[in-house]
Image (spheres, rainbow, N blue to C red):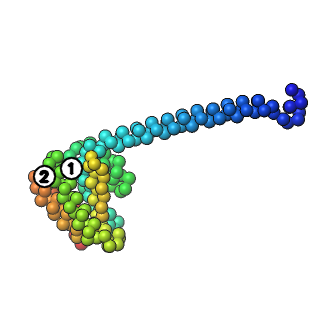
Amino acid sequence: MNKFIFSGEIPSETNARCFRTFGDAMKRTTVVILVILLSSAITLVTEAQKYLKYTVLAIEYIGPKDHLIGPIVISDSKKGAEWFSKAILKKSIAWDYTPEFLVSASMMKSLSSETEVHRGIAQRELSAAPETTMTVRVTLVTPQGQSKFLTNHKLAYSMLDSFKGLSKDNQPLQSEISQFQEELHP
């Protein structure tokens, strides 16, 4: 036995046992890490999915910073509007107060449909326009997913006119849309 210690040689059986133990430990560690990562991913997906049952429409001014206009958040659920304002808007803009408007499911459906119409118009008419001319970002979150588009002030003004017409029964929302339009108009 002393000959192995002094000569620097390790018996092959001990060497194999050492590597087998090390390999087993690495496999266990890898499995534990994968389980932790998978459970974290499942938790994140579950958290995100509980908000996908809401429909949220957000209109944000993204033009020059010398002309600030506050965003508007519209939803068919108070929780959906709060979630969007806190989780999404706060990451993209620093705004102290975001007006959140709760509307009926039927009005939200009408606003969503109108948003999709204007998204198509913006894509068709502004596809070649430089991004620097875009002053408004519109985000629509539905149970089917999320869509965003950028538009210029002219098309945004037209879209907001449509939204005002659809929200004629909701005076506070209609007023906020009018104010956004007034501030947007050059």
Instruction: State the residue in front, 124 or 67.
Output: 124
Task: Count neighbours of disc 1 (C-alpha within 10 A) and say few if under 14, some if 14 to 19, many if 20 or more.
Answer: many
Three-letter amino acid code at disc 2?
Asn
Q: Which mark is residue 91?
A: none
Q: Residue 170 carries which label?
A: 2
The CA distance from mark 1 to mark 2 is: 9 Å
Q: Is residue 41 at all visible to an observer of this figure?
A: yes
Q: Where does residue 127 sit, x and y in percent of width and height?
A: 31, 70
Q: Where does residue 8 sit, x and y in percent of width and height?
A: 85, 36
Q: Where does residue 65 sit, x and y in percent of width and height?
A: 35, 66
The quadrant of the picture occupied by the N terminus is top right
Three-letter amino acid code at disc 1?
Phe
Q: Is mark 2 on a helix, strand or loop?
A: loop
Instruction: State the residue in front, 67 or 122.
Output: 122
For mark 1, what is the residue? 101
Q: In this view, does 175 lie to the left or right of 3?
A: left
Task: Count neighbours of disc 2 (C-alpha within 10 A) and say few if under 14, some if 14 to 19, many if 20 or more.
Answer: some
Reply above or below: 175 against 65: above
Q: Is mark 1 on a helix, strand or loop?
A: strand
